[in-house]
Each structure stands twice: as structure tokens, then as C-alpha cells.
Image: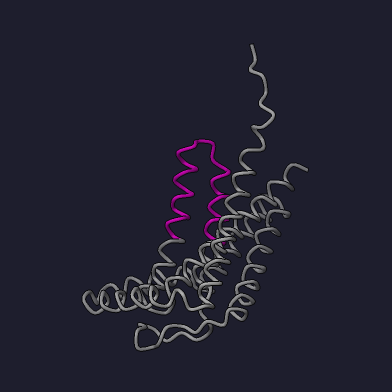
Amino acid sequence: MNATPDPFRSLWRPLLLAAFIAAMVFLFLKLGSEVVEGETQSFDQRILQFAQAMRVRYPVLADIMRDLTALGSTAVLTLFTLVTVIYLALFGTKRMAALVAVSMVSGVTLVSVFKSLFGRARPDLAFAELSVSGLSFPSGHASMSAIAFLTMGALIAATHRRAGERIYILLVAGLLTLLVGLSRIALGVHWTTDVIGGWAFGSAWAVLWLLVARALAKR
């Protein structure tokens, strides 16, 4: 005897994802508000000084963090995106390829807009391992690595049937996103709240476009 279909089965996952997006948007806006008011400065300064002390104590840490931060660079993420878009266009669907491209381009644009709106200066060069120009909130590396790795991870995971394989792929995508963000803090080129804000925006943006892709796939 066949089980009675659950009418809510197809709704709970999109609802959970929508709730996640709302939570990340709230976190981003809350952090942005506190950054503008200077309420995070004491916390950020303590972490900045701790990161500098760790680099002095363990010089190899700076070399490792430079390698990790390169994973979130414009060149690397652009390469990953191009490879993914071309693959989807050739072996998947042109619609999905276009969605990935649009999600990345629009994400970059929004990060630039947010940086201008919040206008936060980067940490003083005396605390940084590298000299980096531009504004600070949210972290572009953290934002765009979240969008790129989480989106690509979800697309790859969707091609596997085993739950263990999908979970592993998503965990790797999340780990790469985490490491890129932590590298920006460790190198002293971003305040900690810049990175948290970048993670919040980037993950929300990635999930939003995955919901769009899911909706279009049902048409």
C-alpha cells in the first residue's frame, strides 16, 4: 500500500532556505548598523591585535594565510566561475550557466555598493601583514568566496544521489569559505565584523539564487 503523499514535503526545504536568507540578511544589517555606530570597534581591535601577535609568534602563519586568501581573490574566483559557467553551458543548461554568471556579477556589484554605503576604513597598516586598498565592510573576499563556493558546491552536490556525498561536498564548500574569511582576519587586512558581514551577505545571496534556480527548474 502506497503512503499518502505529504502535501508539505515539497515546501519545507524552500521555507527553511527562505528563513536562512532572512536570518543572514538580519545579521548583515545588524552588523552594518553597529559598525556605523562604532559599537564593534573594541571587539574588532582586540581580534586585530591578537592576530598580529599570532603572526609575530608563528611567522609561518602569515605564509599559510597568504596562500589561503588567494582562494578568494578576484583572479581565482573569476577562473572558477568561468570554468563552471562553460561546463554548465556545454553539459548542463544554458539557463543554469546564466544564473551562476548573474549571481556572481550582481554579487560583486552589491559588495561595491555596500562598501560605499558603509564607508568603513580598513585596519591601520601597522596591524596588517599586507597593504590593501579600498573600503572594508563587508569583506569582498568573504562575500564572493561564499557566493562562489557555496553556489558551486550546491550545484555539484545536486548531481550526487548519496546523502553522504552531498554533505561532504557542501562541507568542503563551507570550509573553503570559512578559511578565506579567516585568512583576511589573520592577515589584519579586515576587521572581524567585515568578514562576518561578508559571510552573511554571501551565503544569503548564494542561497537566494539557488532558490531562483530551483523555481525555474520546475517550470
Colour scheme employed for the rendering of this structure:
one colour
Residue 41 position, x and y percent, is 42, 77
Please say whether residue 30 is one of the residues in the magenta stretch: no
Tell whether 160 sits left or right of 183: right
For the C terminus, the quadrant is top right
Query: Is 167 in front, or is 98?
Result: 167
Q: Residue at x 54, y 68 (%)?
A: 77
Residue 154 position, x and y percent, is 56, 50
Query: Is 3 in front, or is 194?
Result: 194
Q: Residue at x 31, y 75 (%)?
A: 51
Q: In this view, does 129 lie above or below 72?
A: below
Q: Is the magenta stretch mostly helix, strand or loop?
A: helix
Q: Which residue is drawn at 55% across and 66% down?
A: 30
Q: Which residue lies furthest to the top in this view?
A: 1
Query: Is 212 in front, or is 192?
Result: 192
**In which quadrant of the rendered view does residue 131 lie?**
bottom left
**In which quadrant of the rendered view does residue 40 lie?**
bottom left
Residue 91 position, x and y percent, is 65, 50
**In which quadrant of the rendered view does residue 45 lie?**
bottom left
Tell whether 169 sits left or right of 65: right
Q: Which residue is drawn at 54% across and 78% down?
A: 36
Query: Is 77 in front, or is 23?
Result: 23
Residue stretch in magenta: 147-176
Count of numbered circles on the image: 0
Tell whether 82 sits left or right of 185: right
For the N terminus, the quadrant is top right
